[in-house]
C-alpha cells in the first residue's frame, strides 16, 4: 500500500539532499532540528528513517521520508516530521545537556 505525502521528489539533487539529512539523524540520538519555517525542535530520534516512495495529491510518485521523534514534553510523547521540512540538524551531546552539569556550590 502506497502512502501519500504533500511533497514528493524525483530530482536526483533533491533526493540526495534528503539522503544527506537522514544520514545526520543518529539512532536514539538527541538532536536540535531547525525546520524550514525557522522553528526549532529538540527531541530523540527513535530510529534513523529511510527514503520511501509516496504519492502526492495529484498521484505523482516520488520520494520522501518521515522521522519519529520522542519528546516527553508533548502530550503523546512522540511526533513525526517530514524530512523535507528539515533545514539543519545539530546533535546534542550529553555533556551539553543540563542534567550532565555538576551541581553548583554557593
Image (tube, rainbow, N blue to C red):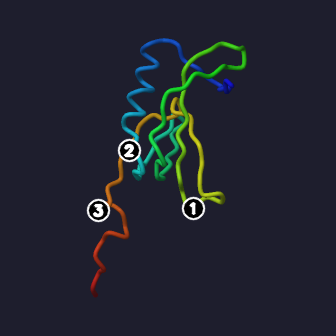
Residue drawn 42% across the image and 51% down it:
28
What crowding class fits label 1: few (fewer than 14 Cα within 10 Å), some (14-19), or many (20 or more)?
few
Q: Is residue 27 above or below residue 50?
A: below
The one of 39 and 72 positioned closer to us in this rendering = 72
Identify the mark nearer the N-term, 2 or 3: 2
Q: Is residue 74 above or below residue 16?
A: below
Q: Which residue is mark 2?
A: 26
Identify the mark nearer the N-term, 2 or 1: 2
Mark 3 secondary-structure assignment: helix
Identify the mark nearer the N-term, 1 or 3: 1
The one of 28 and 1 positioned closer to us in this rendering = 1
Q: Which residue is mark 3?
A: 95
Name the quadrant of the N terminus: top right
Q: Residue furthest front?
A: 1
Q: Is residue 99 left or right of residue 43?
A: left
Residue drawn 57% across the image and 62% down it:
73
Q: Quadrant of residue 18?
A: top left
Q: CA distance from mark 1 to mark 3?
A: 21 Å
Residue drawn 72% across the image and 14% down it:
58
**Residue 49 image position (x, y, % from top left):** 48, 36
Q: Which residue is mark 1?
A: 73
Q: Is residue 64 left or right of residue 100?
A: right
Q: Is residue 68 above or below residue 21?
A: below
**Residue 61 image position (x, y, % from top left):** 62, 14
CB atoms of marks 2 and 1 within 8 Å: no
Q: CA distance from mark 2 to mark 3?
A: 17 Å
Q: Nearer the viewer, mark 2 or mark 1?
A: 2
**Residue 52 image position (x, y, % from top left):** 54, 26
Amino acid at each position: 500500500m502506497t502512502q501519500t505525502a504533500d511533497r514528493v521528489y524525483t530530482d536526483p539533487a533533491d533526493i540526495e539532499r534528503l539522503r544527506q539529512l537522514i544520514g545526520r539523524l543518529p539512532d536514539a540520538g538527541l538532536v536540535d532540528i531547525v525546520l524550514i519555517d525557522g522553528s526549532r525542535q529538540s527531541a530523540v530520534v527513535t530510529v534513523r528513517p529511510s527514503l520511501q516512495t509516496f504519492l502526492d495529491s495529484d498521484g505523482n510518485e516520488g520520494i520522501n521520508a518521515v522521522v519519529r521523534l520522542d519528546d516527553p514534553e508533548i502530550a503523546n510523547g512522540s511526533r513525526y516530521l517530514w524530512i523535507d521540512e528539515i533545514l539543519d540538524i545539530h546533535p546534542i551531546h550529553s555533556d551539553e545537556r543540563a542534567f550532565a552539569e555538576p551541581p553548583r556550590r554557593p
